[in-house]
Image: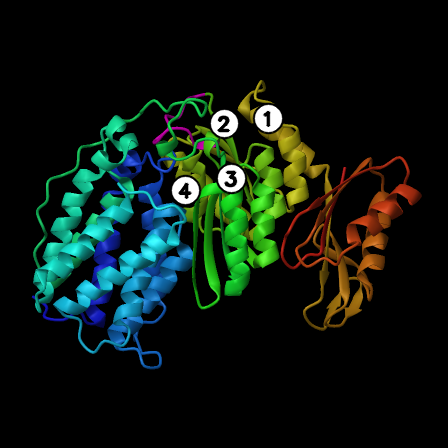
Amino acid sequence: MLDTLDAAAVRRWCASGLATLRRHQGEIDDLNVYPVPDGDTGTNLVLTLTSAQQALAMDLDTVADGAATPHGHALRLMARGALLGARGNSGVILSQILRGFADTLATTPRVEGPELAAALRAATTAAYSAVTRPVEGTLLSVVAAAAEAAERADSPQLRVVAREAADAAAQALARTPEQLPALARAGVVDAGGRGLCLLLDALVEVVTGESPQHPEPPPATPPRRVSPPATAARETGSPEYAYEVQFLLDAEPEAVGRMRDTLAALGDSLVVVGDQGTWQVHVHVNDVGAAIEAGVVAGRPYQISVTRFADQGPPRPVRTPDGRAAVVVAAGAGIAELLTREGAVVVPGNPSTGELLEAVFGTGAARVVVLPNDPDAQAVANQVAEEAHRSGVKVSVVPTRSPVQALAALAVRDPRRRFEDDVIAMAEAAGACRYAEVVHAGRDALTVAGPCRAGDVLALVEGEVHLIGADLVDTCVALVDRLLGGGGELVTLLVGADAPDGLTDAVSTHIARRWPFVEVQAYPGGQPRYPLLVGVE
């Protein structure tokens, strides 16, 4: 039994909490009916706490940073990792609960009963501050009840305060259906609140060596019928908003405040939280482009994720023999929006096997085509295909090397064809699309087109350097001429996040003048590093 929470105990709490959430992941997913019936709260909490544990693992010695104590430093690592890996509303709020712990206990010499109560109060404040329109009957109510009970305990003993907080959280969880009609109609408790109760129980077990005994919440009864958006009640999570948009943002607080106002006018379920200049943004909207543009105006958005709720369906969707889906790996807000419009599930660039596998299973389809758009991602996709096969899901990988090839492949999808024939058609369309990219050289090198120096403009065709130039626009124009010299009827231009103003117009005008019978489609891709991606079909 511990008298104080030290760094080792913080590590055990994180590990134990993550293990507990994993055991109950499916149960919590089935509970989820708010803010939308997307059935992923358990998964989001697991991914968020996994990121927190990874942050701890990268700092094994737990050396205090500045004035922070070892346990304070460990909590800061947990909070920072959770923030960077937060998924969904519940994940973001959990990251702020951990931030409340870290901020309060960072410089506290010993963490006993009163200190834990103060940390829970700070966690509650941070959680409520993270949500634009707080709703009772959710994770917020559960953490608030835990904080109030910890303060009422008024005990110097850590174990007493931890137990009181966990008991009160469990009682508050049981009351959530009384506070939120959507839960009462579904006959379940709040999913995020259930996850927090498990974490508090894990804390009690670390402190006391004993596992708390609380009544199990009523199980969900999947599949539940989800009301159509036209008739769904407002409490079920604003079903009129079709997309969930999440991203990390590097920006100044003043710019973030303006962005918050813009996003609040676009949708709901808005959560904006940050730490040391990095912010986690979550919102439900109909206009994906406007939401991402708000982030671009505020600073530098990255790790952008766009999810269409209509694609997710009710919790734990049943895979049908004819069910099909497409999962695409891509970086760039504009590219993500284009692919989403084509009906694909978009995974941010450089995913792990687990992240890509999660996306595949998340479609609920029995047959999934994966478009990796990168050699490294293709290796991950091949591994995912093997893992998915063991679970009865057929995954076919079309070896696309660029988002322009993915767009070409998605354009020919036809659900009336056999799945295998459709995959062949997509592969043929992707192969018929020649791709190229323009990038600035990062160092001096010898290429197949000759020597280049750092800062030179490189034009790559099919992965090989073909042109080296000093001016970006001139090099882009020369690249398009070289591609069209080999034939082509359609040119697709995806403009990068760092491209200068006027690049699209300059290249499009040149094509119209030099190649008058060629159609041009230009889009803001938002991809990093590459000012321009080009596809020719």
Residue 280 at what x, y percent from top left? 45, 56
Task: Give the residue pinned by disc 3.
Answer: 285
Q: Earlier in the sequence, mark 1 or mark 4?
A: 4
Q: Earlier in the sequence, mark 4 or mark 2?
A: 2
Quarter placement of the C terminus: top right
Q: Earlier in the sequence, mark 2 or mark 1?
A: 2
Q: Earlier in the sequence, mark 3 or mark 4?
A: 3
Label 3, label 2: how many angstroms apart (C-alpha)?
25 Å
Report if the CB atoms under discs 2 and 1 are less than 8 Å apart: yes
Q: Earlier in the sequence, mark 1 or mark 3?
A: 3
Three-letter amino acid code at the position of disc 3 = Val
Q: Earlier in the sequence, mark 3 or mark 2?
A: 3
Task: Give the residue pinned by disc 4.
Answer: 358
Task: Give the residue pinned by disc 1.
Answer: 422
Q: Residues within 10 Å of mark 1 (few under 14, many from 20)?
A: some
Identify the magenta region.
311-321
Three-letter amino acid code at the position of disc 1 = Asp
The mark closer to the camera, 2 or 1, is 2
Q: Residue at x 63, y 46 (%)?
A: 334
* Color encoding of the figure: rainbow
Q: Residue at x 35, y 35 (%)?
A: 39
Under tag 2, what secondary structure?
A: strand
Task: Give the residue pinned by disc 2.
Answer: 324
Q: Residue at x 69, y 72 (%)?
A: 443
Report if the CB atoms under discs 3 and 2 are less than 8 Å apart: no
Residue 510 at what x, y percent from top left? 88, 48
Q: Residues within 10 Å of mark 2 (few under 14, many from 20)?
A: some
Label 1, label 4: how many angstroms apart (C-alpha)?
23 Å
Three-letter amino acid code at the position of disc 2 = Arg
Under tag 4, what secondary structure?
A: helix
